[in-house]
Amino acid sequence: MKFTPGAGLLLSLSAASLTQAKSPCKPSTCNRDNCLRAIVASNFPARPGTADCKSYFLTTVTPRPVTKYVTVVNTISPTTTAAVTVTQTDDQTATDVVSVVETDVVSYTRTQIVDVTDVETVTVTVPQRQTPVKRQATAVPSNIPSYASACSGSVRYSSACSCIGVTASTTLAPAPTVYQTVSQTATLPASVIFNTVDTQTISPTVATATVTTTFDTQVISQPVETDTVTLTDATRTITATATSVPPAIVTGQVTIVYPSGSTSQNTYGFTRPLNAQAYFIDGSSDPNAATTFELTPDGTIEAIDGSASGDYAFYSQGVGPTSFILVTTDTFAASQGGSKLQCSRDDQNMLLCNFGNSVGEWWLCGGHLNIVQAGYDFTNTCNAGGPSTKVSIRFASST
């Protein structure tokens, strides 16, 4: 989105501001009272009135920390040794030793049976849950210098500073970096080594018989005992590391739901231009006019169609308990002290977004969607004309 120099700042709007902010507004006439005289006296070296006014109007925005992950992998290569006992027998055939022989044929079996029980144990190591990090913070200085004690409060002091030509400014602090270490243990498949610990050789003796009257040959088959060795200590252990699967992107539309008993019909959220740089979220009875949004895995809301495509939903909590929701770019939002909405859905697909450190409430002010600090009555304090209406927001997937 292209930004137009000179576009009206959100903080100075009445019905279209990102927040009802305390912006310095130069009065049409300046009352030269004791408060203004104290600040005008800044030409004295010990009383830098202009510099103090600039410091008072300076807003510092510290972005939310950037988390970087360092993965440490420990590899284990286990070895299991299995003992095997082998029994070996020799086949022998009895033969005659005299002229007439009764031959005994004995069949022996050479057996080597090894029964290995392979047990596989899987151990899963799951990375610990990320330590919550602070969101973007906005610091607004509010100290009035002692020499301006004639100024009874921030309103008179701000007015006097505006009379000497001082305006508000915003500075963006570098984003802090937080490092988290994820330990993973990878165990390779165990190597099983079979060692022959005992070898037995059986050589049976076959009797020889001499027959003088009968010419008969018999074949005798005798079974030989078979030794079976069962190994139960050959165990292979595999350790795997489970990787957390990030939540999927949810694509859908915003439905503005009026409270029970209201005569108003639910409407579909769409982006209405505020200026060339930002958009309100308003309601329409035509579902074809609705804007499609994405709820990203990190909880932000992004418009993915229409003229606001690629922009995110922002709000500001710097100066009051209420804020318009604006869909705009990171750059423009930062210049106005805005923060990206951090949201999730409950089991009824109702959209829950944070206002500061707690879940805020949804209101319509002048037809525009606002997020309000929980418990604050916004009914009669909307400066966009008419009373405000408390609503709910449903974010249903369109897939």
Image (spheres, rainbow, N blue to C red):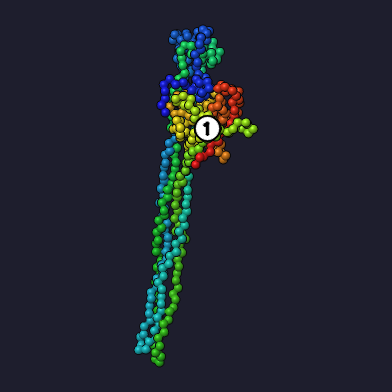
Horizontal and vertical percent for residue 83?
Answer: 42, 62
**Which residue sits at x=39%, y=91%?**
212
**Which residue sits at x=42%, y=50%?**
187
Location of the N terminus by quadrant is top left
**Of 35 and 189, the residue lying toward us:** 35
Q: Horizontal placement of 177 versus 157: left or right?
A: left
**Of 133 and 216, the residue lying toward us:** 133
**Which residue sits at x=56%, y=13%?**
152
Residue at the disc numbered 1: 269
Residue 90 found in image quarter: bottom left
**Of 261 and 114, the residue lying toward us:** 261
Dot 1: within a 10 Å radius of its alpha carbon, few (fewer than 14), some, or many (20 or more) residues? many
Q: How many marks?
A: 1
Whether residue 270 can be seen here:
yes
Horizontal and vertical percent for residue 381?
Answer: 59, 22
| Above-or-below relation of 118 to 385 | below
Horizontal and vertical percent for residue 35?
Answer: 52, 10
Mark 1 residue type: Gly
Q: Secondary structure at mark 1?
A: strand
Report the residue that reaches farthest toward the right: 261
**Which residue sits at x=50%, y=21%?**
13
| Above-or-below relation of 389 to 248 | above
Horizontal and vertical percent for residue 385?
Answer: 57, 22
Whether residue 339 can be seen here:
no
Q: Horizontal placement of 44 versus 368: left or right?
A: left
